[in-house]
Amino acid sequence: MKIMKYTLWATVGLSLLFASCESILDINPKDRLTTKDYFTNEEQLRLYSNQFYSNNFPGDGDIYKDNADVLIVSPLDDEVSGQRVIPETGGGWSWSALRSINFLLDNLGNCKDQKVRDKYEALARFFRAYFYFEKVKRFGDVPWYDKVLGSDDADLYKARDSREFVMGKIMEDLNFSIEVFKETNRTKELYRVTWWTAQALKSRVGLFEGTYRKYHGLGDYEKYLNDCVSASNEIMTASGGYSLYQSGSQSYRNLFKSENAIDAEIILARDYNNDLSLVHKVQAFENSPTLGRPGLSKKLVNYYLMKNGNRFTDQPNYATMEFKDEIVNRDPRLAQTIRTSNINMNVTMTGYHLLKYANDNMSYTGDSSNDLPLFRLAEVYLNYAEAKAELGTLTQADIDNTVNKLRTRAGVTGKLNMNAANLAPDPYMCAPETGYVNVTGDNKGVILEIRRERAIELVMEGFRYYDLMRWKEGQCMAQSFKGFYLPATAINKAYDIDGDGTNDVCFYTTSSQPNVGSVTYVKLASDGSGTSLSEGNYGNLLCYSWIDRTWNENRDYLYPVPRQEITLSDGVVTQNPGWNE
């Protein structure tokens, strides 16, 4: 069954809970949820658990918008602009999805089939682990609940449990799910949680917590990185598993524009179906002037290597290359992530017009129905390589089996050499203005290269913000948000962006619009109130220069707890550091 149908199925399942198959004389209450005749068989457990998918996994916009420092969207999220405030209520401090999970776990005893009980306990505990992983990422310490609470339960406003305690519980749940699924749910299914999905989540959780602990000085990071390595290795070496999708000259792009998720590489996906009106808005997001005018940042574009594996930013004139020149002989994923021709400046503020997920009808701005990946093998490869690099156990063979496989699939002929990377770390990726400031040690160069690969391979898949959080690199949010470079000769006249011989746009700084023919006109702000040029009358398109984007190192890596939660608990629930008023 497919994931976007789960809400309907869950509604059907819940309605059964309110129905009665007994006589009119039945004394069971009709006005509230009862479990006397429910959760007794696999069909009922499956119907009820369908809601877990839609309640917990990210929705479409939370995946492809991927707001942080490498994808610039209007308006900026408050986290990115530095405008977060303490909310009165809400703010992500919600436990309704957890209640549904624990409700199933509390009532599994109604089912007399042990194998069925084990299977659905494993599924529920997978989703509880996922739920709590998202909460720990957001808030750090959170209260752990493994049962349904009543309205007068004293634990409703208990103190937050420690991060270490909750992460231990998450790993317990995942290990239980993996062990059960090994026997009962080892098949590959695109839209259902299986053994493979549980291992992939363990890989993700282990990498996040291990690197968060390492870079934030929390200690005991190695055990989580080792969990990541072991779970990733299970997926990479298990028989009957996954491989990188390699078909045609644009396999990377085809992986994301495909109507049906490609199960060679994708472990779990959200299913969409136009015939059932199960759609999302990625095509409109990329091609409509009213949905944020998104574009890649110049920083990320500079991360893309040359096709031969050399660093683009090693060229002496890289910073002043025009678009038509900077796209030549690059990592082919660049031209499968942004358009290299027919750029529409009405829909992108940086000039790097998005293409990833788009179908072949480039003028289409309607609904989309291509499936969106939630877990895929490429992430597992990157998790494995990064965890081993941070542990100091990475080998060239590991690089060849992970990062270099991704580069080969992309069409990059030059491969990553671990020793060479460590001998000469990329200055661009070390610089405070464009890179990461907290990477040190013997593996500094290769860690930076793995981060490069991750940023490129996984862009628009919902990872970037929390990657910066776990690396303690929030300062990237305060780096300049730049688009492509324009020489002075390109301003106030018709300009050919892609070098195809046809003028596309007129960027103008004059008070009135020039008349230079049938092109798109883009007004550049001279007072810093809109998109401007970094050097005044030439330079990079500069986005959001009028916002004083700051990052508070002592506060901003965690979200604030809503005021109401603190008040209702009489201060037992405490605020995160730096957010006290």
Image: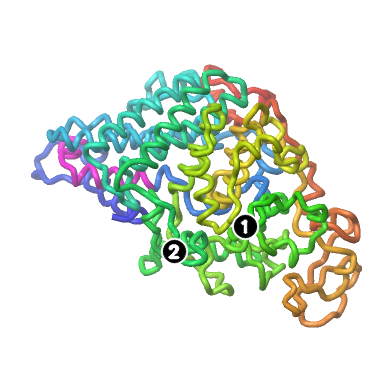
User: Which residue occupies the foreground of this view, 363 or 50?
Assistant: 363
In this picture, which residue range is highlighted in magenta? 35-53
> What percent of the width, then of the height, locates residue 361?
53, 74
The residue labelled by disc 2 is: 247
> What percent of the width, then of the height, locates residue 516?
84, 80
Q: Are marks 2 and 1 in contact (CB under 8 Å)?
A: no
- Residue at 53% x, 38% y is 396
Left or right position of 125 against 58: left
- Residue at 45% x, 25% y is 167
Q: Quadrant of the C terminus?
A: top right
Secondary element at tag 2? loop
- Residue at 48% x, 60% y is 256
**Residue type at the position of mark 2:** Ser
Residue 264: image quadrant is bottom left
> What percent of the width, then of the height, locates residue 435?
71, 40
**Residue type at the position of mark 1:** Asp
Of the two numbered discs 2 and 1 on the same chain, state the one appearing first in sequence. 2
Query: Is residue 245 visible in the rendered structure shown here?
Result: yes
Q: CA distance from mark 2 to mark 1?
A: 17 Å
> What percent of the width, then of the height, locates residue 71?
65, 52
| Residue 264 lies within the magenta run | no
- Residue at 53% x, 45% y is 403
User: Which residue occupies the foreground of this view, 405 or 355?
Assistant: 405
The residue labelled by disc 1 is: 331
Q: Quadrant of the N terminus?
A: bottom left
